[in-house]
Amino acid sequence: MNHSSLLTNELNRRRFVTLAAKSFLGLSILPWASSPRAQAAGLGLNRPLNQAPKAKNIIYLYMSGGMSHLDTFDPKAGSEVSGLTTAITTKVDGIQLANTLPLLANHTDKIALLRGMTSTKGAHQQGNYFMHTSYAQRATIVHPSMGAWLTMLDGRFNPTLPGAVVVGGGSRHPLSGFLPTSHQPLAVGNPNEGLKNCKRLWGMTEEKFSKGLSLSEKLDQSFIQKYNFEKVKAYSDMYEDAVRLMKSHDLEAFDLKQESASTRDAYGEDNFGQGVLLARRLIERQVRFVEVQLGGWDTHQNNFTRVAERSAILDQALSALLDDLQKRGLLEETLVVLATEFGRTPTININEGRDHYPKAFSCMLAGGGVQGGQVWGETDPEGREVNDQKVEIPDLNATIAYSLGLPLDKIVYSPTRRPFTLSDKGQPLVELF
């Protein structure tokens, strides 16, 4: 039996043991154990649980700034709203993409286009936050993002690496929100620089390092005993995790120099392309959730020039990723998500740009048990209204969770004892699987 088969069997065993422990010990399972469509007490929800999830990992590509649906996934051939954008045929009969995505056109048999997305948040910060958390932004609380929900509800697969990583997410990313810091995604700035500050300083031997840690623990011991609070313990756990990672061979997963020049070129030399390649390397080491952001989609001016530039970066990296995952046998167990906070106006403004438009936009799913070669949702001939199969943002996040087999109706309480569930009241699109 080859190494990948052994690893897959071991991961399946771990998942079984985790679920069995939850069931037998009554841990974190009560709201949904009685039936697949059990209701969460007090919230009146009735959402299905995926009893046979295929997705184990998520690669989440976020198009920051509001990607134009009309110039990417939902072109309107022959309409005045098209501007300079034209539609092209793809590998799947009946599915067209914009001419800005020629490489992805060869992979439409692997993807599901969600053309019926809609939102009520038309400002960047609020829309970005809503897409990441399924909750409206509030001054009094920060809600968890999907990576934090995943590690809290289903755990890590690799104990030495973080359960979730965000590449280029910026300072406003909600990360773990009100969940314990043990579920905080690791933020990575430049994927080409590896993981910074993770090696001992020159001249610092293992013996000196161990003595320093031992002394620090002794100095902190009385404080920890006196103030035995969750946040104090979390701070200690953070040190333990950091030291474990520093000593782990898995640290090399962050080193893109170990990839061949041809592979790195295939993804694109920009930070987004290299970030997507890093995401593939991390999920191979069982990091469960990796988000990579591509900004620059706020095209109030020169929409057609700027969308073409952004799309070329996206087209190369996403096409390389889908091809790579399939060749490595990872596409079925990895859900690839492409999301953005809203679309752009069908009306072209005086600056040859498109403005914010949350009423209708597009997202994309691939792998993870999702059936490729399909379109969910339809907008009118000008892309202004969703005519059929409307998808709200919590529905998209519920679909991601469903693909992983996460308990959508599990109630988690914030520090102020307010009840929350993953993806709020969103309903998963089970028909996509």
Image (cartoon, grey):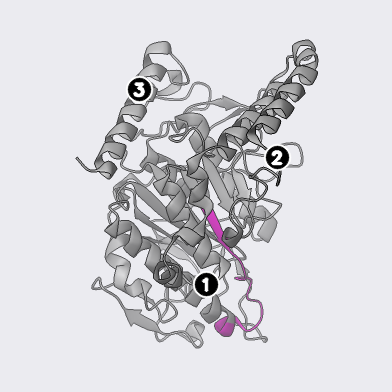
User: What residue span does the magenta drawing correspond to?
Assistant: 291-305
Task: Give the percent coordinates (x, y) of residue 329.
Answer: 27, 52
Residue denoted by label 1:
269
Label number found at residue 410: none
From this viewpoint, is residue 188 visible?
Answer: yes
Counting residues from the start of the chain, the first of labels 1 and 2 encountered is 2
Residue denoted by label 3:
17
Task: Give 395 or 28, whichever is nearer the viewer.
Answer: 28
Q: Which residue is drawn at 44% across and 72% down?
A: 265
Q: Which residue is drawn at 36% across and 33% down?
A: 49
From this viewpoint, is residue 341 visible?
Answer: no
Q: Is 66 located above or below residue 242 in the figure?
A: below
Residue type for callout 1 = Glu
Task: Give 1 or 29, whichever is nearer the viewer.
Answer: 1
Task: Give 127 or 275, whichever is nearer the viewer.
Answer: 275
Q: Is 241 located above or below residue 170 in the figure?
A: above
Magenta residue check for 88: no
Counting residues from the start of the chain, the first of labels 3 and 1 encountered is 3
Residue type for callout 3 = Val
